Image: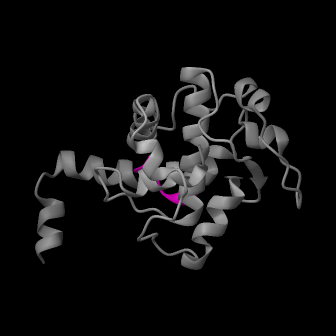
C-alpha cells in the first residue's frame, strides 16, 4: 500500500473537519505507520519515513501536497491503489488504524504534532541528524515511545477549546453567532 492511500483516507475521514496541512498530514501518516506496527505487527505502507527538520515525513506525501504550502489541504491526491484497496477484505484493519489515528491525533495542530514527534524517547529524536533525511526504521519505531500512549489534549489549543466548551456551554456558540 502507498502512503498516499492513507493520506486520502484521512482527507476523506468521516469527520472531515480535520484541518490538514502538509506538515500535519505527514505526522498523521507517521503515527498511522506506528499504530499499525504496534497493533498488527506489520507496516501499513511501503514508503520510507524520514527525519526532516519538522519531524517525520514521507517524501511522496510531501511532494503530493507541497503545492498547498502551509495552507489547508482541500483535495485527495491521486493514488494508484486507493480504489483497489477499498475493495480488499482486509482493508478494515487499515480503516481502523486511520480512524484511531484521526481520533487520537487529529485535533492537535501541526506544530503540537511536531513538538510531540520531537520529544525525548521518540524515534525521530533517536535518528535525527541536522540536514540529513535519515530513515526511521521499524526497529527505531519499536524501540521508541511512539504509539505508547498519546499526547492527549492537555496544554493544547484543542484542549483549551474543549475545556471552554465544557465549562461555558454557550460561549463558543455566542462567538460563532456574533
**Image quadrant containing the C terminus:** bottom left
Q: Quadrant of residue 116?
A: top right
> Is 84 placed above or below 132 here?
above
In percent of the image, x 18 and y 62: which residue is there? 172
Expressed as whole percent of the image width and height from the top left, the position of residue 9 reads 42, 50
Image spot of residue 33 (x, y percent): 60, 37
What main secondary structure does the magenta stretch of the protein show? Answer: loop
What residue lies at 62% left-to-right and 50% top-to-bottom? 115
Identity of the residue drawn at 59% across and 36% down: 44
Per the rendered image, the range of residues in magenta is: 106-111
Q: Residue at x 39, y 39 (%)?
A: 99
- Judging depth in this view, the residue of 119 and 123 nearest the camera is 123
Q: Is residue 152 above or below residue 47?
A: above
Is residue 165 shown above or below 32? below
Would you place residue 110 above or below residue 124 in this image? below
Q: Position of residue 65 (x, y in %)?
A: 57, 69
Q: Is 110 within the magenta?
A: yes
Q: Is residue 137 among the parts visible in the rendering?
A: yes
**Quadrant the N terminus occupies:** top right
Task: Give yes or no for residue 135 being in the magenta stretch.
Answer: no
- Residue 131 at what x, y percent from top left? 88, 61
Amino acid at each position: 500500500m502507498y502512503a498516499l492511500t492513507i493520506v486520502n483516507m484521512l482527507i476523506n475521514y468521516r469527520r472531515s473537519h480535520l484541518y490538514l496541512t502538509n506538515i500535519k498530514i505527514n505526522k498523521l501518516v507517521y503515527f498511522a505507520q506506528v499504530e499499525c506496527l504496534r497493533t498488527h505487527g506489520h507496516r501499513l505502507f511501503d514508503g520510507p519515513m524520514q527525519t526532516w527538520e519538522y519531524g517525520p515525513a514521507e517524501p511522496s506525501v510531501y511532494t503530493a501536497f507541497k503545492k498547498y504550502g502551509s495552507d489547508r489541504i482541500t483535495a485527495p491526491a491521486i493514488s494508484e491503489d486507493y480504489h483497489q484497496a477499498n475493495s480488499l477484505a482486509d482493508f478494515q484493519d487499515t480503516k481502523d488504524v486511520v480512524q484511531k489515528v484521526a481520533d487520537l491525533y487529529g485535533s492537535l495542530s501541526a506544530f503540537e504534532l511536531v513538538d510531540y514527534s520531537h520529544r525525548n524517547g521518540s524515534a525521530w529524536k533517536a535518528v535525527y541528524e541536522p540536514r540529513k533525511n535519515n530513515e526511521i526504521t521499524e526497529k527505531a519505531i519499536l524501540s521508541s515511545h511512539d504509539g505508547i500512549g498519546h499526547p492527549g489534549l492537555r496544554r493544547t489549543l484543542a484542549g483549551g477549546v474543549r475545556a471552554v466548551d465544557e465549562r461555558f456551554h454557550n460561549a463558543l456558540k455566542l462567538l460563532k453567532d456574533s
